[in-house]
């Protein structure tokens, strides 16, 4: 057996653990807040599917789903996917402050409108969602210390606003103190390494610049180069699933984009946020610096607060892990 085949066999064995209950093994369930810009691209849909499937197997407790994008369709689409996976009561937050990433009247992809028109949801528009900062503060204050993982696959708008928040009815701590006390780590699909100018960073450059520099816990970055070549979605798009928003989004978009699959930027971040970096990726510790124009550079540093993913297995192997997850239908 070649080394490549051995590596593929081992990662497939690891994947078996994706769909078995962690509770029975005594492993700690991840308490997760998911923050997305769902809309400019559709890998967010695949990322949400990975998250919910892992929740179905008892590996993650989804505390909230947040939008970092003010576009009117984002929160309703988030609710559609939560509802499809039998979790309609997961709280949904969205930015309410001035400034930030205001894509309110742009990026209305056909698939987003399709989801809103064809699947059940209660929110009429993103404006109807809860205030993201208040929701963050409410949830974090109620959790044990150092117990929450935040996974952001969109803009840093909510992160920056949270850090700047003042004490309120939920906590006497300011935002940075609350994060430092309650958050274990932040996992982010953002940046290009060793340098780049990536969408999630430059759309709200000020928030990225301020939040990343001030964030008081470890940040794990899944850079643009990690997910770019990992194509997923083809199997679910051709599956026999009925009334599935996941299947429908990929079927609609891959026909127009690339029938072989879509880049898996956001999916890799969710996988790592819940399952950890190993055995899927190697890592390098260091410090990311965000410039005023939204570009970034990376400096390796064994004592740095930041970690970046480094390719380990082939793109085909990681794609198989993700595709095997997103093709699963909700647990009944």
Image (cartoon, grey):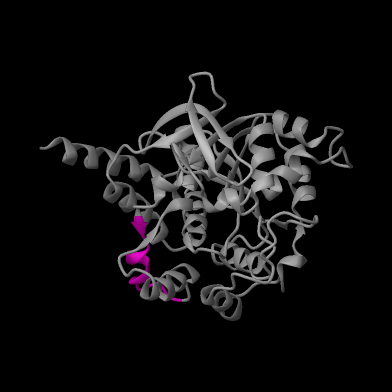
Tell me which segment is drawn in magenta: 231-242
Task: Please identify the residue farthest to the left as the structure is shown.
Answer: 1
The percent coordinates of residue 262 (x first, y second) are 39, 62
Asked if the stretch drawn in magenta spans residue 234, the answer is yes
The percent coordinates of residue 101 (x first, y second) are 68, 57
Identity of the residue drawn at 31% across and 37% down? 312
Q: Look at the picture and state if 93 lies above or below 248.
A: above
The percent coordinates of residue 174 (x first, y second) are 82, 34
Identity of the residue drawn at 65% across and 40% down? 209
Q: Is residue 46 in sight in this rendering?
A: yes
* Image side of residue 132 versus residue 300, left or right: right
The percent coordinates of residue 302 (x first, y second) are 48, 19
Q: Is residue 19 in sight in this rendering?
A: no
Asked if the stretch drawn in magenta spans residue 7, the answer is no
* Image side of residue 251 versus residue 123, left or right: left
Q: In this view of the protein, which residue sits in the foreground, 199 or 53?
A: 199
């Amino acid at each position: 057996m070649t080394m490549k085949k051995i590596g593929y066999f081992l990662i497939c064995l690891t994947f078996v653990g994706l769909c078995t209950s962690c509770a029975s093994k005594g492993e700690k369930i991840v308490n997760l807040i998911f923050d997305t810009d769902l809309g400019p691209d559709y890998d967010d849909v695949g990322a949400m599917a990975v998250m919910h499937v892992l929740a179905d197997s008892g590996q993650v407790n989804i505390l909230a789903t947040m939008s970092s994008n003010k576009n009117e369709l984002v929160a309703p689409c988030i609710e559609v996917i939560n509802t499809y996976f039998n979790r309609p009561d997961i709280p949904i937050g969205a930015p309410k402050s001035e400034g930030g990433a205001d894509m309110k009247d742009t990026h209305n992809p056909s698939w987003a409108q399709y989801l809103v028109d064809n699947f059940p949801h209660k929110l009429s528009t993103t404006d109807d969602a809860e205030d993201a900062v208040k929701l963050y503060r409410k949830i974090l204050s109620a959790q044990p210390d150092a117990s929450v993982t935040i996974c952001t696959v969109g803009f840093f708008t909510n992160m920056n606003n949270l850090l700047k928040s003042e004490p309120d009815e939920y906590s006497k701590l300011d935002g940075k103190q609350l994060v430092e006390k309650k958050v274990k780590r932040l996992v982010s699909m953002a940046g290009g390494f060793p340098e780049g100018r990536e969408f999630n960073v430059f759309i709200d450059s000020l928030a990225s610049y301020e939040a990343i520099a001030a964030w008081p816990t470890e940040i794990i970055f899944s850079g643009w180069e990690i997910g770019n070549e990992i194509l997923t979605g083809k199997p679910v798009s051709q599956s026999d699933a009925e009334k599935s928003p996941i299947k429908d989004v990929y079927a609609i978009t891959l026909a127009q984009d690339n029938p072989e699959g879509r880049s898996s930027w956001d999916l890799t971040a969710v996988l790592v946020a819940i399952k950890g970096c190993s055995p899927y990726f190697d890592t390098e510790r260091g410090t990311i610096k965000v410039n005023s124009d939204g570009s970034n550079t990376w400096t390796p540093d064994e004592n740095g607060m930041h970690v970046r993913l480094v390719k380990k297995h082939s793109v085909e192997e990681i794609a198989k892990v993700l595709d095997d997850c997103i093709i699963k239908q909700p647990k009944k």
